[in-house]
Image (cartoon, rainbow, N blue to C red):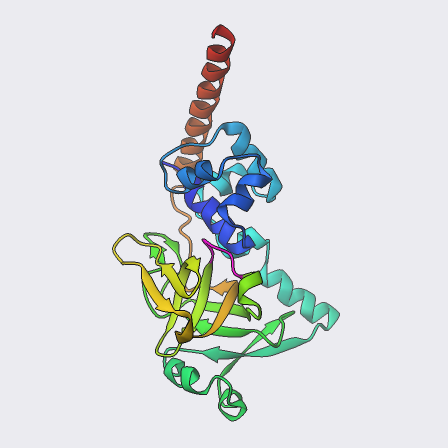
């Protein structure tokens, strides 16, 4: 079993692509993208290779590993720090909404005095209008994949909800009684969101309950990816690619004989 489906879903989330938009890039059906993400179907090897090339990823990254946000965006924090030291780039401090002050933020999100009292993070080459939320629950990870409790979400504010919100993308929703990190399912008079695990139900709330929506640009995670069993994973990807290649050949032969 590969991580291809999980990875293309994460790519869509990071790149802010709906299933339809992702499908259009590679001349696929939207239903096919959904089937890949849910593990109900396997993509053809040509499609896998095309997706990997388009996003400048190796096949090992796309199929075997569980991609991180930094790998998808090709962001190297070490290189960014070195570049800043060498070129004198300016770091900006952005506000941090942690678990301790989340409720106060809901009440005082427009109060400059309160905002100025918050802790800050200093990050290179970042927009000072961004904000960081500490993720509060375990509903956005599925096993080894996803957003984990304690992860820091560096976010940009959505200013035009009708134009900027995209279905199937993860956002930070600031409501009048809580802050939710969820996948957007629908947006109308009622807003429907869901978690990334089957154990938790879908949430729905009225648009009148909504204070702000933030788009997740970067994730600073406490989770360190495992480096064990690399040879085994490489063997697995070789076997999987061989199976996909054989399946593709059989389909070509079947078409010729029909």
The percent position of residue 127, horizontal first and vertical second, equals 63, 72
Q: Main secondary structure of the magenta part?
A: loop
Res. 50 image quadrant = top right
Q: Which residues are magenta?
A: 165-169
Quadrant in the picture for the N terminus: top left
The percent position of residue 132, horizontal first and vertical second, equals 49, 73
Residue at position x 40%, y 38% in the image: 35
Is residue 258 found left or right of 55 in the rendered image? left
Toward the left, the furthest residue is 199
| Magenta stretch: includes residue 168 | yes
Res. 224 image quadrant = bottom left
| Magenta stretch: includes residue 117 | no
Residue at position x 48%, y 70% in the image: 213
Residue 170 is at least partly visible in this image: yes
Q: Nearer the viewer, residue 175 or 52?
A: 175
Q: Is residue 103 above or below residue 245?
A: below
Residue at position x 49%, y 11% in the image: 253
Toward the top, the furthest residue is 257
The percent position of residue 19, horizontal first and vertical second, equals 49, 45
Q: Nearer the viewer, residue 82 or 36?
A: 36
Is residue 65 found left or right of 149 in the rendered image? right
Toward the bottom, the furthest residue is 113
Residue at position x 39%, y 75% in the image: 209
């Amino acid at each position: 079993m590969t991580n291809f489906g999980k990875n293309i879903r994460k790519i869509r989330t990071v790149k802010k692509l709906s299933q339809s938009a992702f499908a259009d890039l590679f001349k696929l059906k939207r239903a096919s993208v959904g089937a890949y993400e849910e593990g109900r179907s396997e993509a053809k090897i040509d499609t896998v290779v095309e997706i990997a090339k388009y996003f400048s990823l190796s096949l090992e990254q796309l199929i075997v590993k569980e991609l991180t946000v930094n790998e998808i965006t090709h962001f190297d924090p070490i290189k960014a720090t070195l570049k800043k030291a060498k070129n004198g780039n300016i770091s900006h401090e952005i506000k941090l909404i942690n678990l301790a002050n989340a409720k106060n933020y809901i009440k005082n999100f427009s109060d400059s005095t309160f905002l100025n009292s918050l802790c800050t993070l200093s990050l290179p080459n970042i927009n000072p209008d961004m904000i960081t939320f500490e993720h509060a629950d375990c509903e956005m990870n599925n096993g080894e994949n996803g957003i984990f409790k304690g992860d820091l979400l560096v976010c940009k504010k959505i200013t035009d909800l009708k134009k900027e919100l995209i279905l199937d993308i993860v956002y930070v929703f600031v409501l009048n009684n809580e802050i939710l990190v969820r996948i957007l399912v629908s947006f109308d008079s009622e807003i429907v969101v869901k978690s990334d695990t089957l154990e938790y139900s879908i949430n729905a709330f009225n648009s009148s309950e909504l204070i702000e929506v933030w788009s997740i640009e970067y994730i600073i995670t406490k989770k360190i990816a495992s480096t064990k069993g690399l040879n085994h994973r490489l063997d697995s990807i070789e076997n999987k690619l061989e199976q996909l290649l054989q399946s593709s050949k059989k389909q070509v032969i079947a078409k010729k004989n029909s």
